[in-house]
Amino acid sequence: MTKYVPLFFIVFATSVAHGKVFSNSYVSFQLPANWDCKVAGTEWVCRSSNNDQARQAIIVLTAKEVGPNDNFAYYNQYLRAAKTPKHRDGTVATASKVQHLNTVQIANQPWADALHLGSLLPNFYSRYLVTIKDKIAILVTFTAKKEYYTRYSRQFFDAINSLRVTATSNKKIGNIKGSHEALGVNIDPDTMNTEGWGESAGDINVNGTGGTSKKSNLWLYGLALLMAAGGAFFLIKKKKKG
């Protein structure tokens, strides 16, 4: 694949207000001004405090324990391929367009670096940065709507250049996925004005077993309630006979 740097990542000679530094148990980076991050399960979701801008761009990061198949060769293979996420009605969306794929060094740490159009959300650019250090794999995604991407390019550039892996072999790392789970992120389409969009293509399924889906969780929850109700009915009936 031809390697090139898109126009979006040219550093403009304009002054940009810098935000605070975000840090968790495994990574840190400079947030755009007036952005905040909140934890959601095993993911951290970062977005602007401005409601309109919050629908235009988002940063999502996650991590997992390294499994037997977590390696840069697989990550590059995955990121090199176009993604075909589905709409909520089950139809397959147009395949994403791969804009670039490189390996970059950030503070002496190698990262697989790829840019897709339409991989996580329709008409949104998503830049993926994936790395491995010691026993942890980290994925950070920078996503923005196509027509607004140049607006956020400098902020994303600064955030990416400031990425630092803070995880160490002797440090307790919390709030991450297990080694058997997929390394991936999910973006709620309703919060980004993309109603009708369904499952994302965010999971890098390195071990052949993805995470449990929401539908699966709901089905299991419903089954548990049904069994509990049946058990209660049986006990009441038994007491009445007694």
Image (spheres, rainbow, N blue to C red):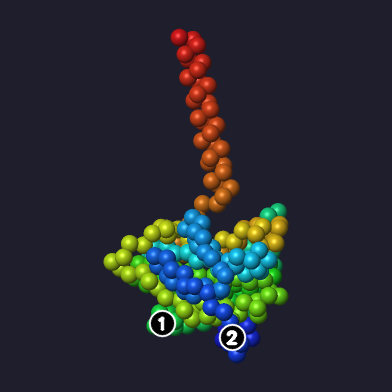
Contact check, label 1 and label 2, Cβ < 8 Å = no
Residue 112 in the image: x percent, y percent?
Answer: 48, 77
- From the image, which quarter does the C terminus lie in? top left
Q: Amino acid at mark 2?
A: Ser
Q: Quadrant of residue 132?
A: bottom left
| Residue at x-position 40% and y-position 67% | 26
Q: What crowding class fits label 2: few (fewer than 14 Cα within 10 Å), some (14-19), or many (20 or more)?
A: few
Task: Answer above or below: position of 233 versus 125.
Answer: above
Give the residue at mark 1.
Answer: 107
- Quadrant into which the N terminus falls: bottom right
Residue 168 drawn at (x, y percent): 33, 70
The answer to whether residue 71 is seen in the rendering is no
Does residue 152 show up? Answer: yes
Q: Is residue 220 left or right of residue 85?
A: left
Q: What residue sits 61% from the left and 58% below the top? A: 188
| Residue at far bottom of view | 13
Residue 178 locus on image (x, y percent): 41, 58
Q: Which mark is residue 15?
A: 2
Q: Secondary structure at mark 2?
A: loop
In the image, 103 versus 60, the foreground residue is 60
Of the two numbered discs 1 and 2 in the rendering, the one whose residue sits closer to the viewer: 2
Q: Quadrant of residue 28?
A: bottom left
Q: Is residue 82 left or right of residue 21?
A: right
Give me the disc on residue 42. Answer: none
The local crowd at label 1, few if under 14, some if 14 to 19, many if 20 or more residues have their Cα within 10 Å, is few
Q: Residue at x 53, y 41 (%)?
A: 220
Q: Is residue 9 left or right of residue 104?
A: right
Residue type indicated by callout 1: Ala
